[in-house]
Image: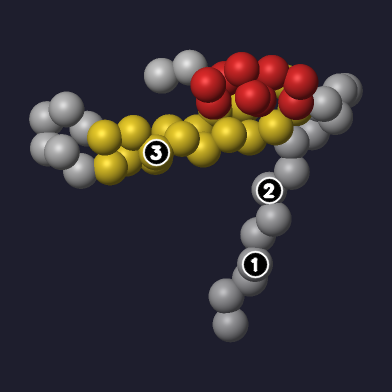
Amino acid sequence: MAKKVVATLQTQSKDIAKVIRMVKSPKTGAYIFKEFIVPSDKVKEFLAKK
């Protein structure tokens, strides 16, 4: 059986979040996913930007 791996962000500060944004590729028109790690209090500001 396959093992399930759970990734944790090990830092001294626990106030961060992993944000996954779906972006349309200009070359192919397909959607790709980009992952970013941002502070928890800046998540709404980050998602508001294009």
Disc 2 crowd rating (10 Å Cα; few below 14, some 14-19, many 20+) is few
Image x and y of residue 31, in percent: 28, 42
Q: Residue shown at 63%/35% (left/top)?
A: 18
Q: Give residue 13's position: percent from left, percent from top.
A: 86, 23
Camera-side residue of 4 and 18: 18
Above or below residue 17? Residue 46 is: above
Q: What sort of colour scheme is used for the picture?
A: secondary structure
State the residue lying farthest toward the bottom: 1
What amino acid type should be assigned to the residue bearing mark 2?
A: Ala
Q: Is residue 40 visible?
A: yes
Between disc 3 and disc 1, the foreground one is 3
**What is the spatial separation of the Cα atoms under label 2 and label 3, in whole angstroms?**
21 Å
The residue sitting at 69% across, 18% down in the picture is: 42
Badge number at residue 22: 3
x and y, in percent, of residue 41 in the image: 76, 20
Q: Which quadrant is the N terminus positioned in?
A: bottom right
Q: Label 1 belongs to which residue?
A: 4
Specify whether 16 is left or right of 3: right
Residue at the spot of label 2: 7
Kindly indicate whether the residue at mark 1 contacts the one at mark 3 (C-beta within 8 angstroms).
Answer: no
- Residue shown at 22%/32% (left/top)? 25
- Locate residue 38: give its quadrant: top right
In the image: residue 7, left or right of residue 20: right
- Measure how far apart labels 2 and 1 are at the Cα level: 10 Å
